[in-house]
Image (tube, rainbow, N blue to C red):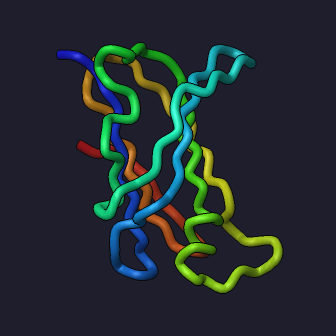
Amino acid sequence: MTGYLTTHVLDTARGCPAQGLRIELFRLDGEKRTHLKTLVTNDDGRTDEQILPADAFETGVYELVFHAGSYLDACGVDPEMPRFLDVIPLRFGMSEASHYHVPLLLSPFGYSTYRGS
């Protein structure tokens, strides 16, 4: 089995997929943080391609950065200054070659994530 990485972002406050949310992927090696890719979610709250496809997959520590503040601004959510949730970094390890699905359930004042399938 080859490994790859996907996500799905749902706006739990509005009850819909989070369309147009920018996501960055970084690989971490000790103190070194390397930007690998930037993607934007489609109308289903997913990316049009795998965040980390099988041909680029390596085990290790990664970080997905979800730009929630910009998304909430675009949705017309009144911003408090500073916004409670702006940039959401999620660090996680991938220890084997399999499908890693890291969803984000988002609202203006909270979020949750898990390893999905």
From the viewer's perspective, tell me whether residue 95 is left or right of residue 33: left
Give whichever of 114, 63 is nearer the camera: 63
From the viewer's perspective, tell me whether residue 51 is left or right of residue 37: left
Which quadrant, please, contains the C terminus? top left
Residue at 31%, 45% in the rendered image? 48
From the viewer's perspective, tell me whether residue 53 is left or right of residue 91: left
Residue 34 position in % (x across, y down) = 64, 22
Residue 38 position in % (x across, y down) = 53, 39
Q: Residue at the far left: name it.
A: 1
Give whichever of 112, 54 is nearer the camera: 54
Residue 109 position in % (x across, y down) = 61, 74
Residue 1 position in % (x across, y down) = 17, 16
Residue at 60%, 55% in the rendered image? 67
From the viewer's perspective, tell me whether residue 79 is left or right of residue 94: right
Residue at 71%, 70% in the rendered image? 84
The answer to which image quadrant residue 52 occupies is top left
Residue at 39%, 18% in the rendered image? 95
The answer to which image quadrant residue 36 occupies is top right
